[in-house]
Image (tube, rainbow, N blue to C red):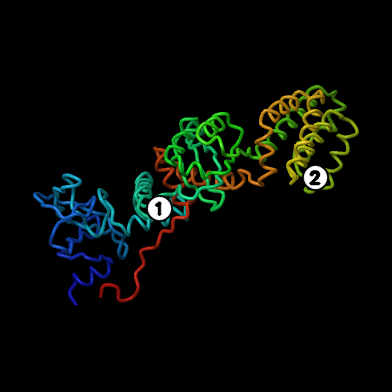
Amino acid sequence: MRITTVLRALLGLKHTRITGFRFTDSGLVVSVEPAKRSSFCGGCGKRGPRYDRRERRWRHLDACGLAVHLEYAIWRVDCPHCGVTTEWVPWAEGDTGFTRPFEDMAAYLAQRTDKTTVTRLMRVAWATVGRIIERVVGRLGPADRLTGLRNIGIDELSYRRHHEYVTIVTDHDTGRVVWASPGKDMATVARFFEELGPERTAELQTVTMDMSGAYKTAVGKAAPHVRIVFDRFHVQRLANDALDKVRRQQWRAADPDDKTAIKGTRFALQKNPWNLTQDEHEKLTDVQRSNKPLYRAYLLKETLADILDRRQVHVARAKLGEWLSWATRSRLGPFRKLARTIKEHAEGILGYVATGLSNGRAEGLNGKVRTITRRAYGFHGAYSLIALIFLCCSGIVVTLPHRPPGFLV
């Protein structure tokens, strides 16, 4: 068997001829050429006349611990459709310095492991991995992720030390990220609806979000028929924040002897009643006995959570009206402010009771995405981060470039 045949099988290159090889200080350089004699456009695949060529190298998967590069004098093609471009080669995509198996391996590792492992194993810079991921997502991702959307969640994600934001749209029915773009303002959401188009926008039924005025206004303009549902967990977080403000106010105003009952109650006040330990139950009992305003704030928080747990929207509406009246008369500044906020967004909050939808799935994905952003530290552009989000959270399956025995032999 010739050595070129062994190399062709070892490297797993289809429709490719091995014309030579040599060892260098950087590893193994294999000279290759396409099996087809004619030249085809690298953009559209149409045959076109060729007129000059230049040497190029592509990084391939390592072999026996050696870095492998493919070398070929690539032609320029005068395509009647795309203009002047480089010819199509069977081992790589378009204008890239890496072979397709190399990019698939890098993307597979980026889906599943940390930054250091990817860069050390593949021997490339992390910023290079980001550009590879963009190409793999473009190659393996669906042509249109926005088809068939009915119930979606919109949320923002901060990155680069919370100075930049990405808006992420999640499909509630599939649990996948379907759209992402830099920014978190009205214009960002407007771009999503422009890509969605009027016909598919008309098919939307529900949009879940936090109580962002920019998101609410943008959705109202682009899809006035859609039911807006405000995320119940954001509402509960506002109630927890109001409770904590009351606790701190009571601590500052209390006499030294009265602070004993408040000390160490922060987590007991925030936790669900069924998760409380015996010590935490005793702390709440001390608060009930010695600090009526703080215990009233605790009851307001728990009552609001009970209302959001209901499944009959008319009952929830009546109970929410009673709660708003109670909070307004509570003489607790943070809860009076919260009551005004909830009254302004009441229909969207009750939308959760009516539909059972929340931004929980989007928030769950958001937690996964936040882990991804920590791994993506070093990506200097939002689009590499977005590509990594799509790679890990949109259902893309990257196949390892493994080959069965006898492949190409």
- Res 227 → quadrant: top right
| Nearer to the camera, 301 or 403 | 301
- Res 102 → quadrant: bottom left
Q: Quadrant of the C terminus?
A: bottom left
Is label 1 in a helix, a strand or a loop?
Answer: loop
Amino acid type, mark 1: Gly
Residue designated by label 2: 273
Q: Position of residue 5 (x, y in %)?
A: 20, 72
For disc 2, the neighbor class at 10 Å (few under 14, some 14 to 19, many from 20) is: few
Is label 2 in a helix, a strand or a loop?
Answer: helix
Pair 2/1: label in front:
1
- Which residue is pictured at 42% across the width and 56% down the height? 109
Q: Are marks 2 and 1 in contact (CB under 8 Å)?
A: no
Q: Position of residue 399 (x, y in %)?
A: 40, 62
- Which residue is pictured at 31% across the width and 60% down the height? 61
Position above or below: 70 against 130: below
Q: Position of residue 163 (x, y in %)?
A: 49, 31
| Nearer to the camera, 112 or 196 | 196
For disc 1, the neighbor class at 10 Å (few under 14, some 14 to 19, many from 20) is: some
Residue designated by label 1: 141
